[in-house]
Image (cartoon, rainbow, N blue to C red):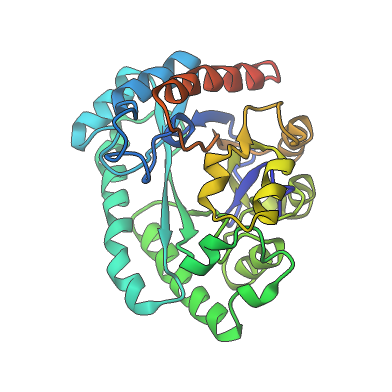
Amino acid sequence: MSNGNTSVNNGSVNNGGAPIAVANAPVSYGAFELTVGQDPDVPSGTQVLDQVAAAGYAGIDLGPVGYLGTGERLGELLAERGLGLAGAYVELPYSDPGALEDAMRELDAILDVFDTVRSYLAGPPPRPTLADSGSKRRAMLPARSVRDHSLGFDADGWRRFGAGLARVIARCRDRGYEPTFHPETGTHVEAPWEIERVLEVSDVGHMMLGGGDPVAMLRDLGDRINHVHLKDARRSVMAGIVTDEAPVTEIWTREAFCELGRGDLDADAVLDGLRRISFGGWLVVEQDILPRSAERFARAAAEQRHNRAFLAERGL
């Protein structure tokens, strides 16, 4: 339920009364699964931690497991910089019981990291940030399911999805962590109608590049929001990707996501909406990029300083 410019994750309840804590994520610096260990220009985890702390953020998302650090040392690195851990993104095949069984190891690895560093952390507890793993077909057709419902699950697919998601949610809660769901472009949960189905089959949800309205979502589903990912984006870039029938990777390569205040998001309306519902918890700034040069990696640090200043000017 987004206009293509922001994402708000939903859970069973919001955290009214708690303060908003602003975090960032390694993907804003070009560090994620497609670059870490693949591109020699990716900044080190320590460099990203230093940049996030220097920019004034209160926390950071985990990124690929092991990237920021491992074991107790990760907790020490966070504590030395006064950073909390906002959460960790994990894509899982909820509708495929066999594949989900194998993929639960990835979720458990993230929860193990949370357990190891928890005593070191400042700020709200980290949230497992759940997303659908999608398919090759959906990855080749980002943002199409808004109009073409045939790309989505049928009734049996949603039944299997709901059962798999319930299993994952139970695992997170059994381990002491309240999850949040992150619909993602190029997966089976991106369009408003798909997000609504997730809300129907579970007690979590979210919004993204699927063609909806984040302000309306805050108004209508405020009691379900327990986590926020804030992005700005250029609708014209996304429209070009759809027109060109380009794959989901072009969203990052063409930099559909941009610095806060420089795209089409009405950030002030989103922040006002969060205040109206007394949201408290992590607000994670994300500006997904897929850099192709050392200069582009370096420029990301300046952009994230801009994003933190943008929010500070608005009282966060």
Work out whether 31 lies above or below 182: above
Which residue ends up furthest to the bottom in the rendered image?
156
Question: 214 or 170: nearer the eye?
Answer: 214
* Residue situated furthest front in the rendering: 244
Q: Residue at x 53, y 42 (%)?
A: 252
Instruction: Name the side, left or right, on which 302 lies relative to 45.
Output: right
- The quadrant of the picture occupied by the C terminus is top right
**Residue under the image location 35 percent in, 60 percent down:** 174
Q: Position of residue 83 (x, y in %)?
A: 40, 25
Between residues 173 and 103, which one lies in front from this camera angle? 103
Give the total of numbered labels. Answer: 0
Q: Is residue 20 visible?
A: yes
Kindly identify the residue that appears in the image at 66 percent across and 42 percent down.
6
- Considering only vertical position in the picture, is 203 above or below 226? below
> Would residue 250 appear left or right of 148 to someone viewing this image?
left
Instruction: In the rendered view, tell whether residue 104 sits above or below residue 253.
Output: below
Residue 130, image x, y percentages: 47, 56
The N terminus sits in image quarter: bottom right
Rendering coords of residue 67 (x, y %): 28, 36
In x, y percent, where is residue 300? 49, 23
Examine the rendering and report whether any part of residue 316 can be seen. no
